[in-house]
Image: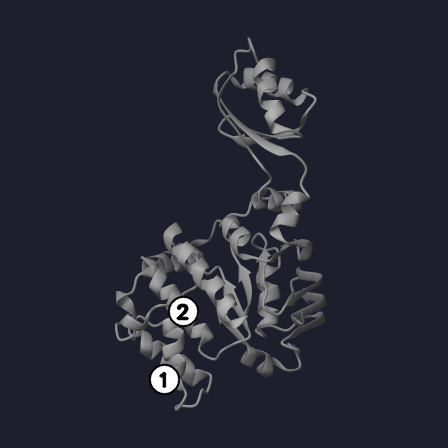
Amino acid sequence: MANIIEVSELRKDFPNGVVAVDDVSFTVAEGEIFGFLGPNGAGKSTTIAILITLISPSGGAALVAGYDVTRHPMQVRLHIGYVSQDLAVDDNLTGYENLRLQAGLYHIPAAETPERIAQVLEMVELTDRAGHLVETYSGGMRKRLDIACGLIHRPRLLFLDEPTLGLDIQTRREIWRYINQLRAETNMTIFLTTHYMEEADSLCDRIAIIDYGRIKALDSPAALKSELDGDRVELEFEAGTPVEIEKAISIICALPHVMEVREMGDNRFQSIVTDGGTVIPEIFAALTGQPAKIGAIGMTRPSLDDVFLHYTGRQLREPAVGAGEAMQTRMRMRRIR
């Protein structure tokens, strides 16, 4: 299968001495749903900005649809669609008018425009709302229209940046369905960023994890999870002083099947164990007679969250923001509601 993205030793240095992208290399196959994950400041956004020709790299090479992003940016743009996490549709226009405006920006011939609009409206199931002002749309409908705007010129490659940010779980799952439908019906390649691990696990054929400007891991979700050893046993103490709980944890750490114990906060702990089914009864037996009492315990297999934490040392969460960013977020959330 041919590659639609080829990145080789890509680098981006900024004047303040920050190396945002540090010799990054990866490929994306045609027709693949490729996830790109990383904490804020990891180099994720900079890499994407280079691939969609918004900024130039300091070194290395990147080919998109066979074109060099530095030497042939216009050809690259003709083959890609980009849907940012911020809604780009105009509330004061109808759905149809938004799409007609987007068609004009891509110089789609006037004779072809109505058919193109009809096709993308049908794909995102907004045909019956095409003549309504976007200000009357729900958050999920706005996002679907936003995706339709990114599809009007029939790109081979669609970049989706946080496509479900701020949407409720039901609407998020609908967007997931549209993304899978896009790939199934058009063989479109989709380059996806997300802060939702469940989303990445559900949608992506492969995932790259980037941190401090470098690719830390790249494989299918299943393969990445299989690389982590052990089950996860999570427990919460309902009784016991800090000293008593500390003693209980030391007892658990000494058990033969326990590899590691991590503190999660609020008297919650996670144990990495070789066999959860064996360890749980051992924990209760070992703590018999101890003043620290376990109120809840459960076992899970390694998740994509665990993979992310393993490679970056941080949980993937929406970051704290400054006043300006907070204002933008509030405005975005208001529109979504």
- Residue corresponding to mark 1: 114
Instruction: Give the image location of residue 201, x and y in percent.
Output: 55, 51
Q: Residue at x 36, y 78 (%)?
A: 118
Element marked by disc 1: helix
Quarter-of-image position of residue 37: bottom right
Which residue is under mark 2?
146
Left or right: 268 in relation to 229: left
Question: Residue flagged by tag 1: what amino acid is it?
Answer: Pro
- Image quadrant where residue 258 sits: top right
Q: Position of residue 193 (x, y in %)?
A: 54, 59
> Could you tell me the amino acid type at mark 2?
Asp
**Is 314 placed left or right of 266 in the picture?**
right
Q: Residue at left 52%, top 70%?
A: 158
Outermost residue to the front: 185
Secondary element type, mark 2: helix
Badge 2: how crowded within 10 Å, few (<14), some, or many (20+)? many
The residue depicted at 48 percent of the width and 59 percent of the height is 162
**Camera-side residue of 303 and 93:** 303
